[in-house]
Image (tube, grey):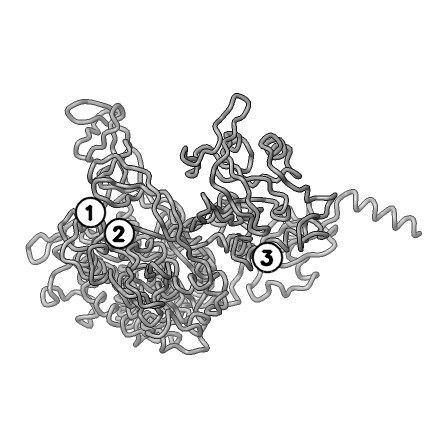
């Protein structure tokens, strides 16, 4: 796209960088509305002028300068990893959040719309290795670049609360919360299998291993190795997190709620810790065994392990398999947590066949399982029958209780003794947070040979990452940073060492939404008063790929902080908007699967083929990716079409939850619509210069006024619902496009003499403002120069106006239904009359509907006003069935 300026041809990108002295076409600079057409040159000048002013205005806003009487609205978009460049997915999610934030500010609410950086993690380490840089240098530079890109998009983020998770001022409080969980018994260290690179001497994430099971970097065959790892015991909150899902709205969470339920499971059992002993030596880590019958814990005969269990090592085999014996007895013993007696452990291939224990340890209780009884008897294990009818016997303090009572009592006892007892599903796993990497939050633990794992004193936080001079990725630099590593034990004063694992980045992102509310607090992670004022988040926007793990961990943190007395709201998020992906058109050779650039494809024939080979090419929509050559750089789009048009294009056409097939064809309609809006304001300003040219027959004018009144209020009503309740920006775009067509049809003679017409223009511009801020500001400035209405603050910015409200005299359509379902017609009433009309008035209106007369007539026994999920008004008539009516007539005849 290009235009001619002073005899020279300019691209949009060049126009965006023209200095103000080179372009003086807009009213905001000249005081004259000279630009009668909305050209690329005018667009560029508008954005060059308004974006810096809008960002300056935005930066002056302060979270602490709001009135207590204002309602709050917390809109949160998932913060980005600072890769260095925005992609179209970023543009989509942040454009949605910005529209919602601006809409609620225009409605007078105290809006929280923060932004920060999910800065720690593996991608930064990989990029640092690739580019020969330190992770921090690379990360900080990327944050600076992406911050400029976000500003250039005219997003109204609360930059005064910005932080990065790699800031010591932030991760100090991540460590603080970790230690609070440690104090609560929710953190433990135990052995877990990891992917080990024997060449680089480091742990690999699953995505760093190729399809041959080799390290992507060293090429070495990856080994499974058991290392002592840190876990957060999220399973202790499994039942709480499951129950919490009943507190959130089904309509607002929808399929995300199902994903969370599936992830958590049924919570129909528990794990009980059995200490392990081998050759009179007690092991550090217990064996956590799942059971759905904790009330029968005194009836255990043995523990059975699957053949792939890590304890199935030949050095522990006490008996070999015989022809008639599949089970292997181990020399390892477990200690019954309630009786202190030894419980034998066996390896059995049959464990895989027990329905609820495909890969886990099995707690054998013969009195409730014939299979367990058969094995126990064959192996000569002793056991007690602890169930007598429905009561528990031979079970110590729990004897005499019903099974249900004993179940609750055993669970509580196990929790008190910290040996389990939390209701979980079989598949529930604790959160492994250890990462054998440098670029992450240091785990604040000191290892002492006398005291074992000792928490770092709170006063010594943060435990900062040591400065490094080079980064190769071969083993963690933390192990070589002697000055940082070697410390004295805070408990006994002996020589000790710091923990060299760092935390999973999901830990950093599990509470970031709380820190935004009090980002500069040096005494606590956040003020409870502020958190209780602004939480929960009203609208959380992000990709569906984060709807399971991130959401689960964030909810877990919030439940824990609530139990700790720091929060009063257990659930952190009211509404979730999981936006769809931005898809690009890809070109793939059908026979080989090789991806091509568009210029490598010949489209001249019946089917597209690869140039040179003639091989058939599949054209399809896929997630944007560099490897598929279907990615689009947002900066290229902005340089060609401008910021406002890019925002409008990404927000229109499809609902936010749907995948967006990206095509520049969208800009044809967007720029055409912008041109129509611009010419409409231009015409109004020109008519205002010559009021005598605007004359209209009073009757015709009244008819036009009434139609404009109805159209304007309908627009306000529908747009408000779409943004306030449905969060659907594409509906708003469609409504604005249609409204433009309606007011374009108003005769020139009526435009300046009609009070409603000016209101239509003003309210339309206010509704455009959240979507296209610069465009709306210039339209407002021009309209303000000739406006006559006293209902607006013309001398102020568009963003200092109030969102237009619906006049209750507008007519609305009311859907008629019978017995909650069948549609029986539709009537129109004034908005103020909805829910207020008498039965006689309702019947008078409804009897004009033939369908109502056929289906309902006078046979209804009552009616009820309501609103459906789209806030459409509904009149529901209760009509007895034919059987009920016949029964009624029989009863009446009987009385007579």
Q: Which mark is residue 437?
A: 2
Q: Which residue is mark 1?
A: 474
Please indicate, yes or no, whether residue 712 appears anywhere in the rendered image.
no
Q: Quadrant of residue 835?
A: bottom right
Mark 1, mark 3: which one is toward the viewer? 3
Please indicate, yes or no, whether residue 471 appears anywhere in the rendered image.
yes
Q: How far from the left and from the top, in percent, is residue 641?
A: 21, 52
Mark 2, mark 3: which one is toward the viewer? 3
Horizontal side, residue 239 vs residue 377: left or right: left
Task: Please tell me which of labels 1 and 2 falls first in the chain.
Answer: 2
Is the residue under label 3 in contact with that under label 1 (CB below 8 Å)? Answer: no
Horizontal side, residue 197 vs residue 534: left or right: left
Q: Secondary structure at mark 1?
A: loop
Instruction: Spot the residue most to the top.
Output: 323
Q: Secondary structure at mark 2?
A: loop
Q: Determine the CA span between mark 2 and mark 3.
A: 39 Å
Residue lying at 10% horizontally and 57% vertically, measured from the top left: 5
Q: Secondary structure at mark 3?
A: helix
Q: How many residues crowd mark 2 within 10 Å: few (<14), some (14–19), many (20+)?
A: many
Q: Determine the CA span between mark 1 and mark 3.
A: 46 Å
The one nearer the camera, 128 or 429, is 429
Task: Please tell me which of labels 1 and 3 falls first in the chain.
Answer: 3
Q: How far from the left and from the top, in percent, is residue 187?
A: 42, 57
Task: Please tell me which of labels 2 and 3 falls first in the chain.
Answer: 3
What count of labels does the image hold? 3
Q: How many residues crowd mark 1 within 10 Å: few (<14), some (14–19), many (20+)?
A: some
Residue lying at 16% horizontally and 47% vertically, measured from the top left: 130
Q: Which residue is mark 3?
A: 413
């Amino acid at each position: 796209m290009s235009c001619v300026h002073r005899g020279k041809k300019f691209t949009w990108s060049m126009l965006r960088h023209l200095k103000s002295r080179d372009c003086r076409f807009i009213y905001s600079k000249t005081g004259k509305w000279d630009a009668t057409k909305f050209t690329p040159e005018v667009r560029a000048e508008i954005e060059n002028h308004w974006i810096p002013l809008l960002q300056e205005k935005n930066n002056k806003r302060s979270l602490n300068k709001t009135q207590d009487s204002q309602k709050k609205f917390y809109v949160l978009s998932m913060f980005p990893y600072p890769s260095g460049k925005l992609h179209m997915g970023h543009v989509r999610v942040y454009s949605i959040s910005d529209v919602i934030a601006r809409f609620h500010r225009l409605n007078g609410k105290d809006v929280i719309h923060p932004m920060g950086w999910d800065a720690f993690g593996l991608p930064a380490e990989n990029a640092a290795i690739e580019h020969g840089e330190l992770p921090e240098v690379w990360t900080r530079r990327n944050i600076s670049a992406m911050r400029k890109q976000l500003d250039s998009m005219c997003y109204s983020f609360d930059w005064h609360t910005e932080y990065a998770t790699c800031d010591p001022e932030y991760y100090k409080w991540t460590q603080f919360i970790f230690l609070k969980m440690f104090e609560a018994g929710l953190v433990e260290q135990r052995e877990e299998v990891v992917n080990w690179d024997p060449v680089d001497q480091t742990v690999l994430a699953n995505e760093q291993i190729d399809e041959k099971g080799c390290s992507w970097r060293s090429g070495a065959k990856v080994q499974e190795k058991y290392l002592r790892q840190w876990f957060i015991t999220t399973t202790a909150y499994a039942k709480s997190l499951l129950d919490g899902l009943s507190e959130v709205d089904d309509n607002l969470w929808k399929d995300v709620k199902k994903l969370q339920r599936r992830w958590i499971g049924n919570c129909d059992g528990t794990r009980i810790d059995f200490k392990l002993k081998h050759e009179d030596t007690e092991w550090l880590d217990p064996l956590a065994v799942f059971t759905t019958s904790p009330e029968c814990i005194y009836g255990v005969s043995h523990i059975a392990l699957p053949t792939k269990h890590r304890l199935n090592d030949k050095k522990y085999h006490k008996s070999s398999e015989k022809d008639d014996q599949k089970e292997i007895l181990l020399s390892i013993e477990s200690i019954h947590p309630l009786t202190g007696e030894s419980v034998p452990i066996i390896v059995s291939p049959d464990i895989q066949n027990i329905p609820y224990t495909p890969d886990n340890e099995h707690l054998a209780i013969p009195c409730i399982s014939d299979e367990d009884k058969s094995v126990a008897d064959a192996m000569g294990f002793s056991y007690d029958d602890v169930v007598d009818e429905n009561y528990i016997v031979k079970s110590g303090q729990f004897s005499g209780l019903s099974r249900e009572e004993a179940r609750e009592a055993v669970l509580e006892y196990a929790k008190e003794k910290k040996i389990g007892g939390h209701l979980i599903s079989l598949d529930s796993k604790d959160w492994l947070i250890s990462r054998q990497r440098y670029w992450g939050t240091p785990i604040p633990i000191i290892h002492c040979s006398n005291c074992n794992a000792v928490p770092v004193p709170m006063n010594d936080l943060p435990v900062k990452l040591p400065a490094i001079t080079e980064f190769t990725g071969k083993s963690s630099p933390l192990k070589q940073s002697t000055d940082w590593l070697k410390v004295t034990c805070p408990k006994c004063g002996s020589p000790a060492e710091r923990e060299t694992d760092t935390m999973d980045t999901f830990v950093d992102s599990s509470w970031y939404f709380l820190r935004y509310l009090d980002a500069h607090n040096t005494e606590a992670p956040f003020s409870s008063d502020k958190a209780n004022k602004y939480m929960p988040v009203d609208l959380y926007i992000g990709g569906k790929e984060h709807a399971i793990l991130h959401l689960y961990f964030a909810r877990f943190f919030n439940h824990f902080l609530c139990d700790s007395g720091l929060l009063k709201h257990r659930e952190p998020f009211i509404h979730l908007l999981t936006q769809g992906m931005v898809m690009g058109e890809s070109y793939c050779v059908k026979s080989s699967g090789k991806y091509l650039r568009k210029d490598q494809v010949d489209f001249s024939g019946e089917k597209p083929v690869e140039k040179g080979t003639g091989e058939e090419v599949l054209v399809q929509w896929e997630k944007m990716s560099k490897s598929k050559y279907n990615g689009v750089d947002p900066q290229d789009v902005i340089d060609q079409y401008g910021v406002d048009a890019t925002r409008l294009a990404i927000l229109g056409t499809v609902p936010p939850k749907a995948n967006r097939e990206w095509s520049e064809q969208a800009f044809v309609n967007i720029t055409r619509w912008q041109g129509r809006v611009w010419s409409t304001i231009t015409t109004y300003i020109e008519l205002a210069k010559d009021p005598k040219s605007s004359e209209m027959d009073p009757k015709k004018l009244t008819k036009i006024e009434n139609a404009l009144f109805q159209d304007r209020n309908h627009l306000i009503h529908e747009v408000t619902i779409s943004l306030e309740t449905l969060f659907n920006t594409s509906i708003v775009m469609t409504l604005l496009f249609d409204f433009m067509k309606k007011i374009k049809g108003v005769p020139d003679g009526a435009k300046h003499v009609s009070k409603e017409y000016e209101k239509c223009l003003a309210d339309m511009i206010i509704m455009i403002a959240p979507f296209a801020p610069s465009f709306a500001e210039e339209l407002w400035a021009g309209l303000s120069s000739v406006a006559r209405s006293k209902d607006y603050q013309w001398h102020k910015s568009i963003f200092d106006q109030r969102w237009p409200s619906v006049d209750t005299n507008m007519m609305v359509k009311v859907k008629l239904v019978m017995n909650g379902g069948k549609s029986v017609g539709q009537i129109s009433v004034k908005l103020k009359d909805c829910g207020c009309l008498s039965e006689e008035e309702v019947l008078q209106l409804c009897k004009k509907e033939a369908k109502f007369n056929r289906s309902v007539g006078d046979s209804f026994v009552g009616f009820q006003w309501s609103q459906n999920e789209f806030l459409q008004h509904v009149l529901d008539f209760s009509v007895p069935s034919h059987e009920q009516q016949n029964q009624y007539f029989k009863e009446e005849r009987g009385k007579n």
